[in-house]
Image (cartoon, rainbow, N blue to C red):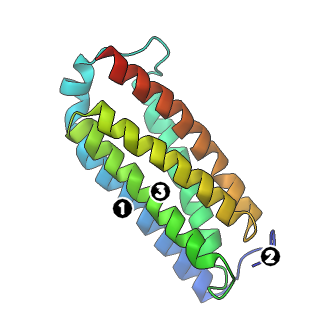
Amino acid sequence: MPANAGIRTNSRSLLSGLLAILVVAAAASLSSLATSPNTALWYGELKKPWFIPPSPVFGAVWTVLYVLMAFAFWRIASGPSETPGWRLAIRLFLAQLAFNVVWSFLFFGAHSPLMALIDIVARWLLIVATIAAFWPLDRPAALALVPVVAWIAFGIVLNVAIWRLN
């Protein structure tokens, strides 16, 4: 699909939208499995940098980011699969989403800020690659991921600080 060409308005678009919501919601739910049981005890005991946002900010930001990711994935998944670069764009998106889930299990589940740091840097690179792959296919989809890459960059800074402090 050429840049800014829009999405198909047919049953494929509807199915792609449902798929996008399910895939992103599944990732959010899986991440929550590792995060929720560890926030009060283990995470609560960690030394944290002065610039860490309050806990409610994380929930609000992640809600918006997951909506943006689902929107971006829907726009790409709705495009013609025979378009050059479409399959790579889908694979990159799914890979970065998988790294998102793995980060939660490494940081909160395994209590390993160092392993989580390795994961989050790889995820940031995957999001940058995803944006680059989305750009020629659908610019609104690519732009929807810019806040994600910015938040993950901030997450890297937080992850480094927590690792160093603990």
- Where disc 2 sits, the SS reads loop
Asked whether, in this view, residue 110 is left or right of residue 81, the answer is left
Discs 2/1, front:
2
Report the side of 102 relative to 21 (left or right). left
Closer to the chain start, of discs 2 and 3, is 2
Type of amino acid at the residue the image marks with label 3? Gln
Q: Give the residue type at disc 1.
A: Ala
Residue 115: x %, y % from top left: 31, 39
85 or 23, nearer to the observer: 85
Residue positioned 66% across, 80% down in the render: 79
Of helix, strand and loop, which one carries label 1?
helix
The numbered disc on residue 2 is 2
Q: Secondary structure at mark 3?
A: helix
Residue under label 1, please give it.
26
Establish if 45 lies above or below 146: above
In which quarter of the view is residue 108 placed? Answer: top left
Residue 13 location in percent, x, y? 61, 80
Tags 2 and 3 in contact by the CB under 8 Å rule?
no
**Residue 96 bears which disc, if any?**
3
